[in-house]
Amino acid sequence: MEAGRVVAEFARLQGALIGALLQLHPSAAPSIPLNLPRTGALIIGGDSWMWHQHGAGLEFVSAHGVCVDAHTAMLDHPDGVDAWRLSTYLLSLGATMLMYESERVDAGEEREIERVLEMMEHDGLLRRVGARTRLFEPVGA
């Protein structure tokens, strides 16, 4: 899969899932996931999604098996992406490769995906969230 497209798709989808969750549970806003039920369901664009809490994050899984594991900074950066979450998403789509320019990396190799995200940052497509983090967000988000 092409990195620019899949990163934008992941960011948009994660943002939509977080937004729908906050509409369903507005009182949860300051402390997601602490103020939420441990599991739940919602519908985005006609697709059914289940969520469950794990640690400080939430995992959303569609009826088709697509997985979006939302990061702990989801309220401040609902479109944020890191290598592990992008890898999880890619693998849930059945993708085996991530492509960027002339690079082709294994969808399950977190370090290689991190390198692609850094290349996208260098090219001005992503920006790092904070100086010492591995979380990126699309430029213009």
Image (spheres, rainbow, N blue to C red):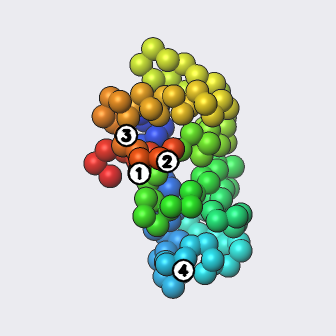
Sooner in the amino-acid sequence: mark 4 or mark 1: 4
Mark 2 surroundings within 10 Å by alpha-carbon count, few (fewer than 14), some (14 through 19), many (20 or more): few
Q: Residue at x 48, y 37 (%)?
A: 6
**Tag 4, which secondary structure?**
helix
Side (left or right) of 58 relative to 121: right
Sooner in the amino-acid sequence: mark 4 or mark 3: 4
Residue topped by disc 4:
28
**Tag 2, which secondary structure?**
loop
Sooner in the amino-acid sequence: mark 2 or mark 4: 4
Mark 1 surroundings within 10 Å by alpha-carbon count, few (fewer than 14), some (14 through 19), many (20 or more): few
Sooner in the amino-acid sequence: mark 2 or mark 3: 3
Residue positioned most to the front: 132
**Mark 4 or mark 1: which is in front?**
1
The answer to whether residue 69 shows anywhere in this view is yes
Do the CB atoms of the residues marked 4 and 3 lie less than 8 Å apart? no
Q: CA distance from mark 1 to mark 3?
A: 12 Å
Do the CB atoms of the residues marked 1 and 2 lie less than 8 Å apart? yes
Mark 3 surroundings within 10 Å by alpha-carbon count, few (fewer than 14), some (14 through 19), many (20 or more): many
Q: Amino acid at mark 4?
A: Ala
Residue topped by disc 3:
126
Q: CA distance from mark 1 to mark 2?
A: 6 Å
Counting the numbered discs, the total is 4
Q: Is residue 84 above or below residue 50?
A: above
Q: Is residue 27 above or below residue 134?
A: below
Residue topped by disc 2:
133
**Mark 2 or mark 4: which is in front?**
2
Residue topped by disc 1:
130
The answer to whether residue 44 shows anywhere in this view is no
**Mark 1 or mark 3: which is in front?**
1
